[in-house]
Image (spheres, rainbow, N blue to C red):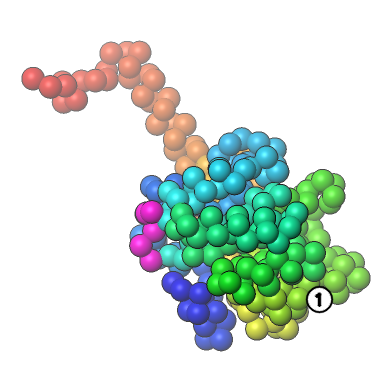
Amino acid sequence: MTIPEFQRHKRDKKKIIVVTAYDALFTRIVEQAGIEAILVGDSLGIVVQGKANTLSVTMDDMLYHTKLVAGAAQRALVIGDMPFMSYQASQEDALRNAGRFLQVGAQAVKLEGGMAVVDQVAAMTEIGIPVMGHLGMTPQSVHRFGGHKVQGKESDHAHAMLNDAKALEAAGAFGIVLEAIPAELAKTITEQVSIPTIGIGAGPHCDGQVLVLYDLLGLFDDFVPKFVKPYAHLKADALQALCRYKEEVEQGKFPSDSESYH
């Protein structure tokens, strides 16, 4: 998957499938499933590091996990998620940090925000760094929103978000994630921009969908948003396996003769 092919999917009305991944093992599994794009999300702060939000995730954290994913990926487009304060302060910060993502193997970066970051987006794309935008419920603004809440319900907010999407497109973004917004607003944005929209809690009308891998596999259940559909229940399977292992060791059943060397 390349950036031009990613964009061609919208013109061909072919849905774009994206998931997050944070390590080599899951990257290989994701690719075996035929997934076309991988976002190394700063969501790792919650599902991997166990934090309450994504704000403490560092560039070093993101570069480490992006390097693992990019090293294992053979076909999928790898997008590195720029963490909090890696791009907001200045264009210089944004360019330097985005470039570091590409140096460890990412083919693109993602950042949150609309009008406030269009100068950074334009600067990045001008020097050849592909950028994906992110509008709606942007997790790095969780304190401003007062929690993880649906955005764009009011008409003025919806209009502003549409303008943000058009501004990101004009700045050269190759796609936009739309998170936790009304389905009709996502439909309007999708119809009015020429670049792909990738929904997460934004209804069925986007050009593609993204989910956090640990959510869709049923590994993370501390907080399950309405928009998450678990396609497996791996936490329950893992817990059952670990309990069986513990029990068999305690009872002397493991290791048996078949797991021992002679």
Please give the residue where the numbered disc 1 appears in the rendered image. 163
Picture quadrant where residue 87 is located: bottom right
Q: Quadrant of the C terminus?
A: top left
Magenta stretch mostly in which secondary structure? loop
Left or right: 248 in relation to 1:
left
Viewer-closest of 122 and 200: 122
**Residue 60 located within the stretch drawn in magenta:** no
Which region of the structure is painted magenta? 71-75
Vertical comparison of 183 with 4: above or below: above
Residue drawn at 38 percent across, 47 percent down: 25
- Return the residue found at the far bottom: 11
Vertical comparison of 186 with 250: above or below: below
Residue drawn at 67 percent across, 40 percent down: 56
**Residue 74 located within the stretch drawn in magenta:** yes
Viewer-closest of 230 and 206: 206
Tell me which amino acid carries mark 1. Asn
Q: Looking at the picture, how far across and down is residue 137, in whole percent?
A: 75, 57
Q: Looking at the picture, how far across and down is residue 233, in whole percent?
A: 50, 44
Picture quadrant where residue 74 is located: bottom left
Left or right: 40 in relation to 143:
left
Residue drawn at 39 percent across, 20 percent down: 246
